[in-house]
Image (cartoon, helix red, strand yellow):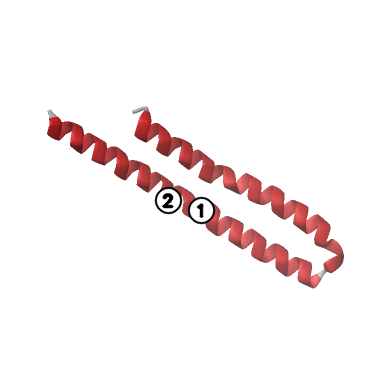
């Protein structure tokens, strides 16, 4: 019985790690891309900097929810299932 519990615990840890690994890559690339293009737009049209900045921050906040959902699922895998 101890071996089965150890295998289940290892499976939970691997599943949670994969969940966070895959779930954190998307928001990281998305936010980096958004900030990069926003800075490029600010450099090209400085008068639009305020609008671009507020839209960039809103987009980054929405993108970050994917990472937060992945963290929630990882915690559920580790501690609830």
Q: Position of residue 61 (x, y in %)?
A: 65, 46
User: Along the line of sight, which residue is nearer the eye, 14 or 41?
Assistant: 14
Residue 29 relative to residue 38: left or right: left
Q: Are marks 2 and 1 in contact (CB under 8 Å)?
A: yes
User: Along the line of sight, which residue is nearer the eye, 17 or 52?
Assistant: 17
Residue 71 relative to residue 46: left or right: left
Q: Kindly state the secondary structure of the residue where label 2 is placed.
A: helix
Q: Position of residue 73 (x, y in %)?
A: 44, 36
Badge 1 is on which residue?
26
Measure the C-alpha gap from mark 2 to mark 1: 7 Å
Q: Quadrant of residue 75?
A: top left
Q: Residue at x 40, y 44 (%)?
A: 19
Badge 2 is on which residue?
22
| On screen, residue 7 above or below 60 | above
User: Along the line of sight, which residue is nearer the eye, 45 or 1?
Assistant: 1
Q: Residue furthest right?
A: 47
Q: Residue furthest front?
A: 2
Image quarter of the N terminus:
top left
């Amino acid at each position: 019985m101890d071996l089965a519990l150890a295998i289940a615990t290892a499976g939970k840890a691997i599943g949670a790690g994969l969940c966070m690994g895959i779930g954190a890559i998307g928001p990281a690339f998305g936010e980096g891309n958004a900030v990069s293009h926003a800075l490029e737009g600010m450099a090209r049209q400085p008068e639009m900097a305020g609008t671009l900045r507020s839209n960039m921050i809103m987009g980054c906040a929405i993108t970050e929810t994917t990472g937060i959902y992945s963290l929630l699922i990882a915690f559920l895998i580790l501690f609830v299932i």
